[in-house]
Image: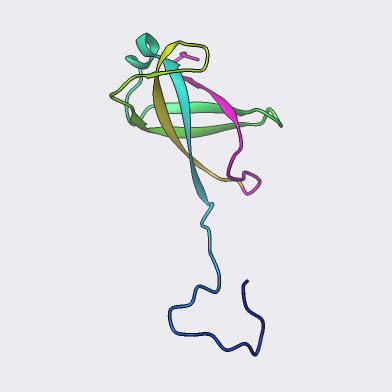
Amino acid sequence: MKVKVGDNVNNGTKIAKVDNTSKLKIQIPFNEADAQGIKKGDTAKLTMATSYDSLYGTVTNVASATSTSASHSIVRYVTISVTNPGALTEGERASAVINNIA
């Protein structure tokens, strides 16, 4: 909170930011050829990088454009929506398997 009890604020002044983290989205790069076997609505198994916990989510988008990864591979980013069990925070890292494609 940016204010305390008893403070006066002007109309329109931002006093707090409320985040809804019950659903999170993660973007994971897949090899361009492999991404052709992934479609919106597919189930994804996510493995969290730090805890190795597994979660299941749903593919919400497969990028139509390709990108070049840091290792110079041609990839398509796949967006996965996952229900947060409560412990996930923004910035978490994960790997994913979709239709036996990792």
Residue 102 spot, x, y in % from top left: 50, 15
> 22 and 78: which one is in front?
78
The quarter of the picture where the N terminus appears is: bottom right
Residue 24 against residue 64 in the figure, above or below: below
Q: Quadrant of residue 74?
A: top left
Q: Is residue 60 above or below residue 11?
A: above
Q: Give the residue displayed 34% in from the left and 14% down from the top.
A: 37
| Residue at the far left in the pictured view | 64
Residue 36: % across, % down: 32, 14
* In-image side of 94 versus 64 (left or right): right
- Judging depth in this view, the residue of 62 and 47 nearest the camera is 62
Q: In which quarter of the image is residue 39?
A: top left
The way the protein has been coloured in the rendering is rainbow
> From what the image shows, is residue 97 above or below residue 24?
above
Which SS type dominates the magenta stretch? loop
In the rendering, at what x and y percent does residue 82 appear? Answer: 49, 39
Q: Which residue is drawn at 47% across and 17% down?
A: 69
Q: Which range is magenta?
A: 86-102
Q: How many labels does the image show?
A: 0
Question: For residue 91: magenta?
Answer: yes
> Does the magenta segment cover residue 35?
no
Q: In this view, does 1 lie to the left or right of 83?
A: right
Q: Residue at x 55, y 74 (%)?
A: 15
Left or right: 89 with respect to 76?
A: right
Taking the spot 39% from the left edge, 11% from the top edge, the residue there is 34
